[in-house]
Image (cartoon, rainbow, N blue to C red):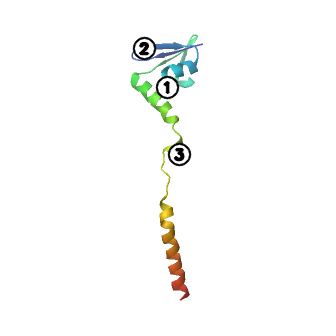
Amino acid sequence: MRYVLITDNEVIIKTSLNKLKSATAAELTEDMFKQFGNAKVVNITNVDLKVLVDAKNFMKIPAHKLFKRDTGYIYLLPMYILMILVLLQSCTG
């Protein structure tokens, strides 16, 4: 089985999907290809190929690095405790 990637500038032919992925650094899936005889072929523009490369790079980023940890509650906790103490003192008289 041969995998063929056709772009605006070049044609890349590899014997497996993993070899094609490593040659292009793109996130290619089996369902993108169409079967033509002994080969599976996909026709992609350079813009689409760049998007697939960016998608692969984005998936490498761990999710915990995408979001900042919320530390605001640490600063508000003493204020909440003081408010509760004041409310309890005013209720008890």
Q: Type of residue at label 3?
A: His
Q: Earlier in the sequence, mark 2 or mark 1?
A: 2
Of the residues tagged 2 and 3, which is closer to the observer? 3
Residue drawn at (48%, 66%) of the image: 76
Instruction: Tell me the residue at 48%/71% (across/down).
Output: 79
Residue 26 badge: 1
Local packing at callout 2 (Cα closer than 10 Å; few below 14, some 14-19, many 20+) is few
Which of pointers 3 and 1 lies earlier in the amino acid sequence?
Answer: 1
**Alpha carbon separation for disc pair 3 and 1:** 23 Å
Give me the disc on residue 10: 2
Residue found 48% across the figure and 44% down from its top:
66
Relative height, residue 87 to residue 67 (above, below): below
* Label of residue 64 in the image: 3
Q: Earlier in the sequence, mark 2 or mark 3?
A: 2
- Estimate the x, y position of residue 50 in percent, counting from the top left: 42, 27
Pointer 1 local density, CA inside 10 Å: few below 14, some 14–19, many at least 20: some
User: Picture quarter containing residue 29?
Assistant: top right
